[in-house]
Image (spheres, rainbow, N blue to C red):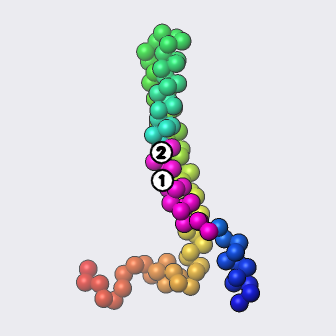
Amino acid sequence: MNENLKQEEQTPKHKDKLVALDSLSLGISMVVAVAIGVGIGLLLKDWTGKTWTLWIGVALGILAAFNNVFKAYKRAQKEFEGMENDPRYAHRAKYGDMSKNDDD
């Protein structure tokens, strides 16, 4: 009983809210990455006078946005890997989501 109390004290009070904000920040970071890329492209265009350098910045922004999505995917995958050994989810991980009562 005392161990459960210690473990409960160690977990942050607002952990669920932090996880939700982390997921929300993915969308925001994608928009910001593309906006920064466009800004870099506009600076390159002003410095060089060549229009095609704008597209280099746009491409960098889009690549940065995809990189953010990939990092979030890897983080979520790592978080859910521990669930397959959890007894509550072991059956579903082994046999899938189909149950005997499904009509599909």
> What residue is drawn where x is 70% and y is 82%?
5
Q: Quadrant of residue 19?
A: bottom right
> What residue is drawn where x is 56% and y is 75%?
83
Figure check: 49 above or below 8: above
Nearer to me, 17 or 96: 17
Check if mark 2's residue and mark 1's residue have beta carbons within 8 Å: yes
Q: Which residue is mark 1?
A: 24
| Image quadrant in which the C terminus is located | bottom left
Q: Residues within 10 Å of mark 1 (few under 14, many from 20)?
A: few
Percent of width and height locating residue 21: 52, 56
| Label 2 – label 1 distance at C-alpha | 7 Å
Which mark, by number, is residue 28?
2
> What residue is drawn where x is 53% and y is 84%?
88
Q: Residue furthest left?
A: 103
Magenta stretch, residue numbers: 13-29
| Number of numbered discs | 2
Percent of width and height locating residue 96: 42, 78
Figure check: 7 above or below 66: below
Nearer to me, 20 or 100: 20
> What residue is drawn where x is 48% and y is 9%?
49
Nearer to me, 14 or 78: 14
